[in-house]
Amino acid sequence: MSNPFPDRDAIATSQLEQLRLLLAAVLEGNDFYRRKYEGIDLADVNSLEQFSELCPITEKSECVADQETNAPFGTNLTFPLESYTRCHQTSGSTGKPLRWLDTNESWDWMLDNWGRVFEAAGVGTSDRIYFAFSFGPFLGFWTAFESALKIGSLCLPGGGLSSAARLRNIIEARATVLCCTPTYAIHLGHAAEREGIDLTHSAIKTIIVAGEPGGSLPSVRQTVSDLWNGARMFDHHGMTEVGPVTYECPDNPGWLHVVEGSYLTEILDGEALNPVEPGNTGELFLTTLGRTGSPLIRYRTGDLVKAVLQDRCSCGRCDLALDGGILGRADDMLVVRGVNIYPGAVDEIVRATGGIAEYQVRVGAAGAMVELELLIEVTDEADADGTAARLAKAFENSLSLRVPVKAVEANSLPRFEMKAKRWVRDGGE
């Protein structure tokens, strides 16, 4: 599995073969895409370039409108409803949640994609994996857990427990792998300090994170490693509507390889929708080649990435690499006094400063100008003012912005088990 393709030409050949099969199935049975492609001849697509020229992109707003008009599941279903066995939904962090259905076949396809994540992280049958989250309607938790079962690891669910109880379970069960968000890995580390739990007694050697861009940020990685006795963090990203997409390169921390045997990837300029040259930032568009029952074709993910295109990575894989992982969301950018600010950049500065247990960004306005204020909880209350001053200076040095920083009482800011929501606009939204 580690190197299924000898070169990038082999990847393209496989993608085209799978794409033709997908389009044939969709044009026969999928009402959503049959309407979308009406008048477009896709019967004899003979190249990936021709496909990109012929096929329009798919926007999330189209999927939302389809499910509103054709409740509850919409019409992006290639087979009769009786063929579907799983239902999950998006978080709704950028709008109304989407419900997504899967057949047994598409579910197995996603489990195999998650298997690439585990393989790249060196996880196998001898590992004990602790899943530090409550299982809800979101796809990633379930696919991670069931993929781990499929590869033969011992799976330890941690749903419905306090952080302290999870930490005790991790140590007592001698778990070797932890799965959670980057934020929650940091929170657990600080909770261990408060509870007097010595993580040098933990057997955790690998922490696999997802759900937030921070997993590929050097300062976040270092913070997690310091808290967890030197454990190596591996990043990954996916989405409910497309499935598990990337795995971290074992040789190049901070690079995410796309599972290109399963996804056709395009990185386009967000406005003109032209291809972006390697090394430049663009928006990620995906075609789910194996999720035939509920596919997405040229789907606009909203994720900003920077591709590293090469024939073969030093790890031996030929899959496209994304330098820095997911850099941010196209709709997350704020312009503050003429400076483009992404949440990932703020997270990097906060973690690099050190001494901060949690933080919150307050977004307000002074007339027509957007303004930021940071609230921080410090790990050393005796140095609260000094930590706030260092962070304010770091913002000025890194972004040429003066950002007010205020230290607040311990445990006064919210904690997050799932995707962190640290940015709060005036009015509390």
Image: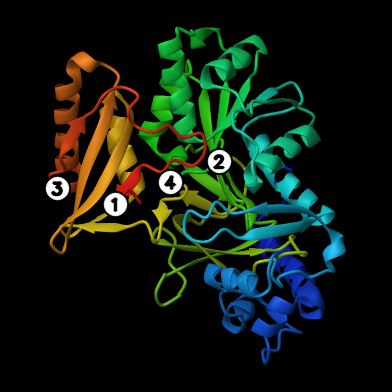
Relative height, residue 27 to residue 160 (above, below): below
| Residue behind mark 3 | 400
Q: Residue at x 76, y 57 (%)?
A: 102
The amino acid type found where label 2 is placed reads Glu
Q: Amino acid at mark 1?
A: Gly
State how far apart marks 4 and 1 are (Cα). 33 Å
Q: Earlier in the sequence, mark 4 or mark 3?
A: 4
Across and down, in percent, residue 288 comes to 67, 62
Mark sitting earlier along the chain (2/3): 2
What SS does tag 2 mark? strand
**Dot 4 or dot 1, earlier in sequence:** 4
* Badge nearest the viewer, 2 or 3: 3
Question: Which residue shows up at 30% across the image and 19% down it?
Answer: 379
Which residue does the numbered mark 4 point to in the structure image?
324
- Work out whether residue 135 or residue 245 is closer to the camera in this orientation and state it: 135
Label placed on residue 248:
2
Q: Nearer the viewer, residue 202 or 423?
A: 423
Please give left or right for residue 278 compared with residue 166 in the image: left
Determine the residue located farthest toward the bottom in the rendered image.
39
**Residue type pointed to by label 4:** Gly
Horizontal side, residue 90 vs residue 292: left or right = left
- Badge 4 density bin: few <14, some 14–19, many ≥20, Cα 10 Å: many
